[in-house]
Amino acid sequence: MEHPTKNDSKGDVTLRAVLIGLALVPINVYIVVQWETVWNTQYPTTMTIFYNAVFTFLSLILLNMPLKRWLPRVALSQQELLTVYTMLLLAVCVSGHDFSQSIFCTLGTARWSATPENDWSNLFWKYLPQRLTVNDDHVLYGFYKGESTFYTAAHIKGWLEPMVWWTLFLSVVAFTMFCMNTIIRRQWIEKEKLTYPLVHLPYEMSREGNGHHPFFRNKLLWLGFGLAAGINLINGTTFLFPVLPQIPLGYNLNVYFTERPFNAMGNFPVQFNPFAIGLAFAIPLDLLFSCWFFFLLWKAERVVGSMAGINMPGYPFVAQQVLGGYLGIAIVAFWLGRKPIWQVIKRAVGARSDADDFGEPIKYRTAVLGIIVGISFLVFFSYQAGTTVQFGLAFFGVYFVIAFAHTRTRAELGPPIHGIFHYGPLQLFIAMVGSRKLESQTLTAAAPFWTFTKQFRNHPMPYMLESFKLADRSGMDIRKLGKVIMFSVVVGIIVTFWTFLQFSYKWGGISEGRGIGAYTVIERWLVRPLEPDARSLSAVGIGALVVFINTVLRLRFLWWPLHPLAYPITGYLPFEHLWFPFLISWVVKGTILRHGGIQTYRRTFPFFLGLVLGAFTIGSLWGIVGLVTGIPTYAFKRW
């Protein structure tokens, strides 16, 4: 059978676009590591859309505009611009707070932070994997004390082997996710046509028409941009000069709920972040309603518990329910897509199948084999580090299930944040079997794994699929883009390690607390062993059950208003800063659709994208000003 040649007309992923991306990646990774680990001021990778990447993308487009007018043959096409954006997205992602950064914080901690009081020398030292950690005090001295340089033979030699192994580990994690995305890409993007709200902004910014970018000629865009940028300029200025009045963007309602049972709600902020309202406006209306409704339901759960006199430690086990919700989402998504996934597997093994892998990033056979080999390597890696094979299989099985659920959530909902607060695969296993049944060597080796699963705020899988969505909308060559994605991942990891080492030897012990936090948790499990926790496991089951019930009701009753994806999203702690912007967007979007229809919605949409772009632009500029001057500056994100 001869395949259609629609790819022949697609815009190529050109060498010059890759080279431009390659030049911009180190700059962005360098900035992110400084913001998040050296200065602890701006945290772009704790969001699902990276504002520094959007700001760099905007700068590139503005530089390209004169070329588009005067030298059109030299100017970058939309496909080339989006190639650069994809490279930035993936490189910044793997450099982020809950991926390579967190692991790096643990590699010398058990050795350096051991004291007679914590007895870590006896608890951990004999179990530390020598190839994956640094245990030479001479190498670690400058790393934690600063006023030194990484560029000595001893320091480079001391870090080289762990850097190589962890780079390989993270690259295999990303490649396994890449293979998983290959299997689900066509079903979610081309057949189900999920909305992918987070791709609207970069796509519209790069879209061309009649030789120009129509997005930047929209007056409503600049109205939204000016409003958000103006607020950030004013508040950024007043941050530096506190005598000037600031524009208030939030208020905490907990000051009105000081007595039982309503004081059980805890923190109850009402915020008016313009960029959050703008991001929420792209989310489907039923999901917007479900988000603020479920958030209030979480608060009501605490109040009811207080009224009933429930004083169980950890009640209402929110993190456990959130984990259960994501496991439920993954099960539902896999079950509903079981037929096309089965066709892909049949194609991979050479059986008769309706699935066609023409135009996919890689062949289905390569993708299935890649998942098997990738997980096998990760299990072997953890075994060599000191865990049991059973632990490795269980840990990475749950890890990739959660990543799968996050990817589905982002494809449908596109929330500004997602995560699970300090309850991942490791905590789940402790609840199932207790820490007493896990060997000391297994727990010690698992300390770095705890760091990149403690909140699950950024991992590559959703960003890869969103890049494929951009490719699908803009007519890019997906196979070529797939190679660029994996190239960007590896480059991003290497640049992150290099940047981290450089800053650590200069300033000393940057983000040392993250590593100490990981080993402190392991120490607690070893010194005070935990028994299996039936309450936590029940909460996990309840979270999955809520998702299952909501899914069944939505499938059977078209009028059912609650979307299951919103349940775990709103249980994540930082969502308390976003529930009110979601409520505002729900009211505004619902009013526009009810009284003006879809055409009015499309006409007003640029205003809300302008809110996002204005906040991201000025927010990035304030962050850069802080790096240049060495003075803390205004952080617009406010969580």
Image: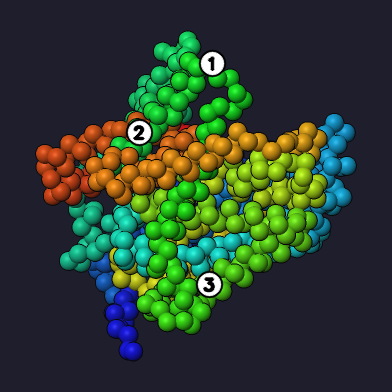
Mark 2 / mark 3, whichever is N-terminal: 2
Residue drawn 48% across the image and 44% down it: 544
Q: Amino acid at mark 3?
A: Val
Q: Are marks 2 and 3 in contact (CB under 8 Å)?
A: no
Residue drawn 62% across the image and 56% down it: 396
Asked if residue 329 is positioned above or below residue 180 in the image, the reply reads: above
Q: Are marks 2 and 1 in contact (CB under 8 Å)?
A: no
Q: How many marks?
A: 3
Circle 2 SS class:
helix
- Image position of 102 (left or right of 52): right
Q: Which residue is mark 3?
A: 368
User: Is 80 in front, or is 408?
Assistant: 408
Q: Distance between the Cα atoms at labels 2 and 3? A: 39 Å
Q: Distance between the Cα atoms at labels 2 and 1? A: 26 Å
How far across and down, in percent of the image, does residue 383 sit? 75, 60
How far across and down, in percent of the image, does residue 167 sit? 65, 62
Q: Are marks 3 and 1 in contact (CB under 8 Å)?
A: no
Residue drawn 78% across the image and 56% down it: 386
Mark 3 / mark 1, whichever is N-terminal: 1
Q: Decide if residue 372 is in sight here.
A: yes
Asked if residue 353 is positioned above or below residue 566 in the image, the reply reads: below
Location of residue 536 (image quadrant) = top right
What label does residue 14 carry, if any?
Answer: none
Q: Which residue is mark 1?
A: 309
Within-10-Å neighbours for mark 3: few <14, some 14–19, many 20+: many
Residue drawn 52% across the image and 51% down it: 402
Circle 3 SS class:
helix
How far across and down, in percent of the image, does residue 230 sit? 31, 35
- Image position of 86 (left or right of 372): left
Q: Nearer the viewer, mark 3 or mark 1?
A: 1
Q: Decide if residue 232 is in sight here.
A: no
Q: Which residue is mark 2?
A: 292
